[in-house]
Amino acid sequence: MRVTTAFKHLLALPGVTVRQVDFGSRQVTVTVALRSGRLRCPACAYTTTARYDTRPVPSSWRHLDLGIWRLEVRAGLLRLQCPTHGVRTEAVPFARAGSDFTRDFEDLVGWLATAMDKTAIVRLVRIDWDSVGRIIARVMDDKLDPKRLDNLFVVGVDEVAWKKGQQYITLVSDHQRGKMVWGAEGRDSKTLNQFFTELGTERSAAIEAVSMDLGPAYAKSVRAKGHAPQAIICYDPFHCVQLATKALDTVRRQAWQEMRLLPDPTLAKRFKGARWCLLKNPVDLTDKQATTLRKIRRRGGEVWRAYALKEALRAVFAGDLSEDEVAVLLDRFCSKASRSGLKPFITLSRTIAKHRAGILAAVHLGINNARHEALNGRVRLIMKRAYGFHSAKSALALIMLTIGPVDHVLPHERQPGVSILSSA
Ligand SMILES: [Zn+2]
């Protein structure tokens, strides 16, 4: 068998003939030629036999490694003139437009990114993390299930920080399927408007309920004409508890600031370490944290009162109460919080009272707090890995490829019938 024929089988690249194979130091370079005489626009379906000029555009792509050898594919591409996109270098069947990597290589990286940490991927595939980010963004564009926006009835809108500082992504999840279905950079009503534009009026009109946090931005977008004004707006219990946790943290910080002014600094120091034992759920506490919590309880005072209020609210939404019971307990919480003398909790009680109907609607529709919290927890874990990315799109791709409607097919799964013995 000739070397070029052997490499044609080894590489299994669609639509090419292998012309030449060169061995360099630690790298195999395979020169290929496209089999089709038609030139394809990389941005649309336009094809033509007419070339724009005769000078070939030297191009190269990284392909899957061959053992310890890096493998580079090279080809001289032609240029065409697309009526819509102007003069472009032709597309190739084995790589996505604008990429320096083959589709097989990108699909592998796309899957690895969902299962492996940053250090491991970068070491295994020998590319930097930002290149991984650009690759997964292309894989996402290509592989997101186009039907993911069909049959949406109960959705949740959420924001997540993708970078330290004020950099956010808005995410839309399908409550019934428990999957992320949409995302975009930003967190205001304009960001969510893009979702409804993509959804179109017909599918928007079918939405029955939207759960969200207690801020005004998302509700404004949902209520807009042509979006989903018919939908019941539900305020996720998860977000209410989040607000209570924030209120508790404010009380704790104030108490700590006051302690620092005391003559004995050890008290303030010890108290600073108490943050996590107050904010974590009691069942998640370590032994040491549980001891600290007992000490705070013995001391009593504002911090303990704030803690008890937060835990009371969490219990209201634990999921084991009837709607009526939740309503009664929620009102009881509000009256307790408003009389607590703790400013952050007085504010919280007003916020909850104002959104009472929406909160109870979420309970009525069974918008599952635990499930939402679990999805939210996974997003936060994924975002920790996304911190090194330079673009929101890469961060979004990491979420979508991991918990979105994406079917990962690895190169060897896509071409199961390739045999070295068939066709020469
Ligand atoms: Zn075009």
Image (cartoon, rainbow, N blue to C red):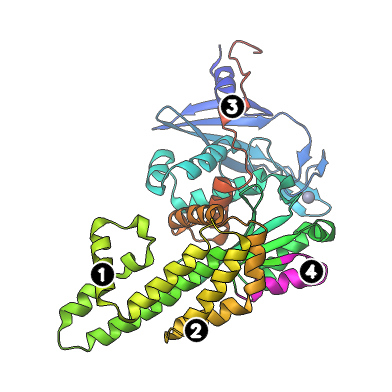
Mark 4 belongs to which amino acid? Pro
Mark 2 belongs to which amino acid? Ser
Is residue 269 at least partly visible in the picture? yes
Q: Residue at x 61, y 30 (%)?
A: 32
| Image position of 366 with respect to 79: above or below | below
Q: Cα distance, mark 4 to mark 1?
A: 46 Å
Q: Assign a secondary structure to mark 4.
A: loop
- Label 2 vs 4, first from the N-terminus: 4
Q: Residue at x 23, y 70 (%)?
A: 295
Mark 1 belongs to which amino acid? Gly
In the rendering, at what x and y percent does residue 328 appear?
58, 70
- In the rendered structure, does residue 218 fall within the stretch colored magenta? yes
Q: Which residue is mark 2?
A: 338
Q: Residues within 10 Å of mark 1 (few under 14, many from 20)?
A: few
Left or right side of 139 for 149: right
Q: Residues within 10 Å of mark 4 (few under 14, many from 20)?
A: some
Q: Cα distance, mark 3 to mark 2?
A: 60 Å
Q: Residues within 10 Å of mark 3 (few under 14, many from 20)?
A: few
Between circles 4 and 3, the one closer to the viewer is 4
Q: Which residue is mark 3?
A: 413
Between circles 1 and 2, the one closer to the viewer is 2
Q: Assign a secondary structure to mark 2.
A: helix
Q: Which residue is mark 4?
A: 229
Per the rendering, the mark at residue 273 is: 1
Does the closest atom of ligand 1 sit within 8 Å of the Cβ of label 3?
no
Q: Cα distance, mark 4 to mark 3?
A: 45 Å
Per the rendering, the mark at residue 387 is: none
In the rendering, at what x and y percent does residue 11 appear?
56, 26
Tell me the magenta residue range.
Answer: 215-232
